[in-house]
Image (spheres, rainbow, N blue to C red):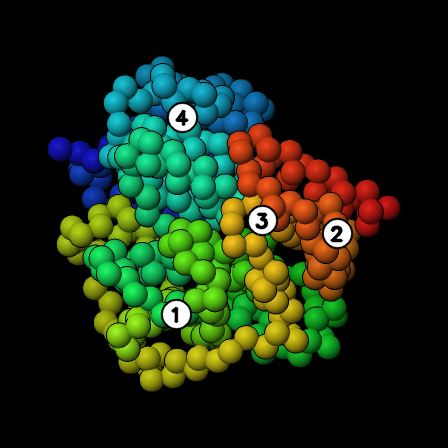
């Protein structure tokens, strides 16, 4: 029987990666739904290649364009995620949620009802509203698998360990595009130098996040929420080769190192197949990389945003949304040449120390709309204070 799946954000890098995996084994899959925001041309190619009968396109202009170009009358075209109930008659086997940003939060929560397994690659949703997602997962009896290489590696290492007894978890960081560049030179760098990641093929936004190490701050917050573990047990280690993705030290003295080649297709593949052995990844262990792991502590003078972790509340709060939204807006302004690179860090540090945002550390989000409201307000605040 074919495995029935849905992909939210199929035209992004994660969406394309999972489709590439399915392409090698098409006979065992049936794609029930693909979704995109604006990239209707890529979506048309995907629907034809995989014979998909349901698509969701959020952007109205792109929706109209898709309808005009599409000649297959069997394809049902929807404009929003309220139509899940019209698409799924019963629970499908698997969903990949890979819509970028907080736009992915509402559809992620809504589709949980209709899927047996959900793999989530949307870090903003997990950081800002994990308890809302987790509540829905438990209510609908839907299994969750993290997709980020670090979180998947942790999940993979402990999934069959009933007595966790974890002493420490180390998430590794490549150090990003600026690891070997003096901090004095940061502001003289061109945008294309800052967005050129040495190991991963990533978009500009996430590459900037890697350069400031805020991406690793976010990943620690994710790990804290997903695995229900204290911040005191979570650490970051620089590992320039990006071969080891997580290290777990147990209280009994044992240590697990999870390694894989620098490609997101490996964790994605494993969320799709889980324990079913297949033949797609046959690469040998990279002895050279294992012999030169070059693990080291983070230089907090060079990457000061890592110190934010010391200020994070232990409980779920709206403060996480402040942090995510502020960084997102500041990176957008930097890429749009509205602010300098150094201002990403200086403005972010200033903003999260404001009393009106500090008090949000004690307020738990009650709904998606509350998270969205804070997101909008933080962006407005930044532009009103710092952009002329």
CA distance separating discs 4 and 3 = 32 Å
Image check: 100 left or right of 330? left
Residue lying furthest bottom in this view? 291
Q: Position of residue 309 (x, y in %)?
A: 57, 62
Q: Can you say whether 103 is above or below 237 in the image?
A: above
Q: Mark 4 falls on what kind of element?
A: strand
Give the residue drawn at x 60%, y 42%: 363
Residue lying furthest front in this view? 362
Which mark identifies residue 354?
A: 2
Q: Mark 2 falls on what kind of element?
A: loop
Label total for image: 4
CA distance separating discs 2 and 4 = 43 Å
Judging depth in this view, the residue of 326 and 261 nearest the camera is 326
Classed neighbour count for the residue bearing mark 3: other residues with Cα under 10 Å, few (<14), some (14–19), many (≥20): many
Residue placed under numbered mark 1 in the picture: 168
Q: From where the camera sits, is residue 101 visible?
A: no
Residue placed under numbered mark 4 in the picture: 55
């Amino acid at each position: 029987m074919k495995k029935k799946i849905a992909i939210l954000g199929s035209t992004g890098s994660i969406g394309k990666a999972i489709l590439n995996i399915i392409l090698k084994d098409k006979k065992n899959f049936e794609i029930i739904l693909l979704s995109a925001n604006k990239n209707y041309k890529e979506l048309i190619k995907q629907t034809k290649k995989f014979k998909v009968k349901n698509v969701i396109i959020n952007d109205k202009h792109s929706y109209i364009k898709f309808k005009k170009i599409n000649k297959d009358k069997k394809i049902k075209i929807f404009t929003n995620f309220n139509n899940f109930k019209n698409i799924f008659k019963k629970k499908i086997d698997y969903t990949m949620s890979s819509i970028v940003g907080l736009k992915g939060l509402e559809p992620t929560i809504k589709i949980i009802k209709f899927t047996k397994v959900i793999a989530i690659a949307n870090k903003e949703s997990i950081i800002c509203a994990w308890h809302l997602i987790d509540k829905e997962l438990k209510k609908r009896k839907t299994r969750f698998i993290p997709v980020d290489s670090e979180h998947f590696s942790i999940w993979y290492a402990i999934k069959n360990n009933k007595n966790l007894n974890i002493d420490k978890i180390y998430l590794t960081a490549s150090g990003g595009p600026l690891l070997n560049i003096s901090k004095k030179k940061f502001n003289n760098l061109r945008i294309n130098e800052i967005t050129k990641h040495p190991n991963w093929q990533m978009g500009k936004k996430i590459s900037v996040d890697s350069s400031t190490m805020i991406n690793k701050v976010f990943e620690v917050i994710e790990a804290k929420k997903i695995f229900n573990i204290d911040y005191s047990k979570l650490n970051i280690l620089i590992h320039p080769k990006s071969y080891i993705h997580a290290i777990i030290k147990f209280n009994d003295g044992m240590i697990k190192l999870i390694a894989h080649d620098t490609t997101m297709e490996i964790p994605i593949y494993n969320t799709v197949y889980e324990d079913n052995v297949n033949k797609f990844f046959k690469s040998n262990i990279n002895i050279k990389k294992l012999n030169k792991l070059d693990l080291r502590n983070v230089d907090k003078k060079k990457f000061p945003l890592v110190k934010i972790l010391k200020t994070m509340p232990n409980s779920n709060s709206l403060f996480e949304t402040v942090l995510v939204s502020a960084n997102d807006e500041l990176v957008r302004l930097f890429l749009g040449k509205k602010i300098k690179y150094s201002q990403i860090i200086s403005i972010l540090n200033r903003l999260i120390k404001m009393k009106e945002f500090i008090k949000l550390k004690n307020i738990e989000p009650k709904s998606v709309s509350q998270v969205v409201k804070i997101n909008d307000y933080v962006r407005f605040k930044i532009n009103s204070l710092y952009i002329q």
